[in-house]
Amino acid sequence: MSAVTTTEAAVTVAPAKDTPQVRRRRRLSPGRRLPAARLAGPVLLLALWAAASAAGQLDPAAIPAPWTVVKTGAHLWTDGTLPTDILTSLQRAATGFVIGLVAGVLLALASGLSRTGEALIDGTVNLNRAIPTLGLIPLFILWLGIGETFKVAIIAIVVYIPIYLNTHAALSGIDHRFVELAEVQGLSRYAFVRQIVVPGALPGFFVGLRLGVTGSWLGLVVLEQINATSGLGYMMFQAQNYGQSDVILVGLVVYGVFGLVSDSAVRLVERRVLSWRRTLSS
């Protein structure tokens, strides 16, 4: 009886040895997000700059050392020059950005939700996009004068174009089956826009928003060198006349910090608003 039991146990256990092992699945995603990972590149660049300056590989008259730039920035902040210029630049950039944001969104909605709006708006915006925006400066000076108005107008144009293009592309890319579903459900126009259009257009809108934020700072650098009496661009232009490369680098660092912070803020809002999406970045 025991021999039969032993034989049956052997027969029962034997197939387990021949069972193939489950192959481990290979991970293709980028992995978990590292904290403050976006600061790694700027920190590395700063370290290389400091190392090259300490080793005497950089001409101090052309590219001052980081500690020299920090010392100059502290001096400009103490005497009140830097805070005034920063505040002026922020006001110009914010005013132009808000105008461009509102214009870009409204034009994209009018063009994306109406064939008549698309016929009247889309071609005009693409024609505007084909014309270099900074090339419009002489014409806008003739129209609006050489004061603050033309600067704000140029920044608004720089901002509204990417916002319009990306939002309109997102609207055009909404699956038509959702539209048919909304029609079957009998949704009103307002409910259709709120439940279908807005969620479908948000990813493209945030891409355009990031480009618009960056564009506002890029346009500001040029505009503040034209008949300006304050602002970061004006400060850098004056420093160029006197050969003060450390002051120029202070302005560039401030522009870079503002650009990085504003882009990070948009990314943070995007992750919160679009938390329902499953993407590689999330």
Image: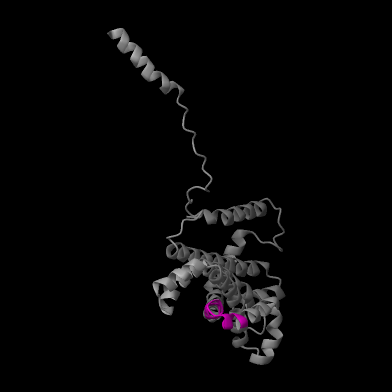
In the image, residue 188 sits, relative to residue 14, either above or below, namely below
Residue 17 pos. (x, y %): 44, 21
Which residue is the extreme one toward the front?
184
Q: Classify residue 99 by image quadrant.
A: bottom right
For this view, does 14 lie left or right of residue 64?
left
Q: Quadrant of the N terminus?
A: top left
Q: Is residue 229 visible?
A: no
Residue under the image location 67 percent in, 80 percent down = 128
In the image, residue 112 sits, relative to residue 39, either above or below, namely below
For this view, does 111 lie left or right of residue 124?
left
Residue 245 pos. (x, y %): 68, 67
Q: Classify residue 194 by image quadrant.
A: bottom left
Viewer-proximal residue among 163 and 154: 163
Task: Provide the major secondary structure of the magenta segment.
Answer: helix
Viewer-proximal residue among 5 and 161: 5
Residue 257 pos. (x, y %): 55, 65
Residue 27 drawn in magenta: no
Residue under the image location 63 percent in, 75 percent down = 219
Count the marks: how many? Answer: 0
Q: Is residue 126 visible?
A: yes
Viewer-proximal residue among 206 and 70: 206
Residues shaded magenta: 105-119
Q: Classify residue 225 by image quadrant.
A: bottom right
